[in-house]
Image (spheres, helix red, strand yellow):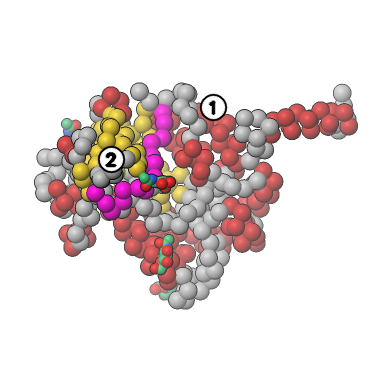
Amino acid sequence: MMHTKLSPMTSLLLFIFLSSLTVGSTGENPFTPKTYLIRYWNKEIQNNQAKPIFLLSKASPLSAAESASFSKLAAQNALGSQLSAFCASANLLCFPDSLPSAFGQKVYVNSTGVNAGQRNYRSAASAKGGSNEFTKQRVEPGKFFRESMLKKGKVIPMPDINDKLPERSFLPRSISSKQPFSTLKVSELKHIFHAGDNSTMETMIVKSLSECKRAPNPGEIKRCVSSAEDMIDFAVSMLGRNIDILTTKNVNGSKQSIMIGSIEGINGGKVTDSVTCHQLLFPYLLYYCHTVPKVRVYQVDILDPNSKAKINNGVAICHMNTSSWSPTHAAFLALGSAPGRIEVCHWIFQNDLTWTVVD
Ligand SMILES: *[C@@H]1O[C@H](CO)[C@@H](O)[C@H](O)[C@H]1NC(C)=O
Ligand SMILES: *[C@@H]1O[C@H](CO)[C@@H](O)[C@H](O)[C@H]1NC(C)=O
Ligand SMILES: *[C@@H]1O[C@H](CO)[C@@H](O)[C@H](O)[C@H]1NC(C)=O
Ligand SMILES: *[C@@H]1O[C@H](CO)[C@@H](O)[C@H](O)[C@H]1NC(C)=O
């Protein structure tokens, strides 16, 4: 057989082989970012957990051909030349934002509010958190709770767990790995995403990059990940390969009274380590992941208190050692105690997730 050129017969066989792959279990083209992610998951995660539906829902919707051609453009530093096509097909957050004008102000107002909320929430999950800004605001009922509240039949308030950030997808790693990602490279990012000086887009990019650059708290290991594969790598490096993703199933029960149904404790209800990931606002999906030691993680059936019908399955995390938290942390304002005296629990919000070792 010649090495230089495929014979028509070989091409035909190759075509048949490749076509047969496409009618695998998913019926999808085997070279899309999504099918690549499935193979990556199967290679890296060694257990019999079901497919990571949550992660797959965040995978890039690009076709194999689009992914290849945008990846080529990224390598040539030329994605900016096809920004609108790129944003539309890759499901990114882009908006015309070439001037520091009033345009985009709406998004900015939204995102600031959202970011404040996020910070508030994240501080609960990080080893050290809280700031004086919380003392001025009332803490939403149900945002923090004691572990003793997680008892079958108890009726408790549920906070608003809706994700307020615009929906976006990850980039395929073949593209995200070629993106500038540093506070030193803001001008390159501004060029790609057509963001003018002092624009909303620039502010958003700088804010998230700074959060990624921030030194970890003592004992915390953190990483910003811009692809599903990078997230898997970080979780595996922290927890090993026998891991799974836990998320709250939907947003039902938000801002209402809920009744606690059946409860399942991860690791037999014993203290465990976890990696929790929170979204950051960026043109493409970006997560800030960090280790969260000494937690108890529960999967909780959430019931309608009137009908007792199951409306949700929530993931609750209880931080058992709060001794390094700030005394002004919203959790202590809400629950009325002090660092190290109590455990603090909260729900995993929509589109956030936690990785744990499988029992
Ligand atoms: C931003 O604010 C506008 C106006 O208040 C609202 O319609 C829109 O849904 C908000 N977007 C997000 C992502 O919260
Ligand atoms: C951007 O903001 C800086 C600092 O506020 C200011 O000096 C600069 O003139 C602004 N640039 C534009 C283009 O508005
Ligand atoms: C719960 O949420 C799901 C998905 O959003 C929805 O389809 C379902 O109807 C909700 N169930 C109840 C009981 O509200
Ligand atoms: C709780 O955390 C503090 C500070 O992070 C640490 O010094 C202490 O040993 C921890 N306590 C337990 C019981 O792990």
Mark 2–mark 1 Cα distance, whole angstroms, equals 41 Å
User: Would residue 232 appear left or right of 5 to someone viewing this image?
Assistant: left
Helix, strand or loop status at disc 2: loop
Tell me the kind of residue under disc 2: Lys
Mark 2: few/some/many CA within 10 Å (<14, 14-19, 20+): some
Tell me the kind of residue under disc 1: Lys
Q: Position of residue 135 (x, y in %)?
A: 17, 59
Q: Residue at x 38, y 26 (%)?
A: 358
The residue wearing badge 1 is 43
Location of residue 343 by image quarter = top left
Q: Residue at x 73, y 32 (%)?
A: 18
Q: Is residue 317 above or below residue 334?
A: above
Q: Is residue 256 above or below residue 272?
A: below
Q: Examine the rendering and report whether any part of residue 35 can be seen.
A: yes
Please, what is the dominant secondary structure of the magenta stretch?
Answer: loop
Quick one: label 2 or label 1, which is nearer the N terminus?
Answer: 1
Q: Examine the rendering and report whether any part of residue 352 can be seen.
A: no
Residue 250 on the magenta span: yes
Q: Position of residue 215 (x, y in %)?
A: 33, 47
- Residues 103 and 75: in front is 103
> Nearer the viewer's eye, disc 2 or disc 1?
2
Q: Quadrant of the C terminus?
A: top left
Q: Residue at x 31, y 56 (%)?
A: 117
Q: Position of residue 236 (x, y in %)?
A: 43, 31
Q: Point out the stretch of residues depicted in magenta.
A: 243-257
User: Would residue 242 appear left or right of 229 to someone viewing this image?
Assistant: left
Mark carried by residue 72: none
Q: Is residue 191 above or below residue 2?
A: below
Q: Residue at x 69, y 46 (%)?
A: 65
The residue wearing badge 2 is 308
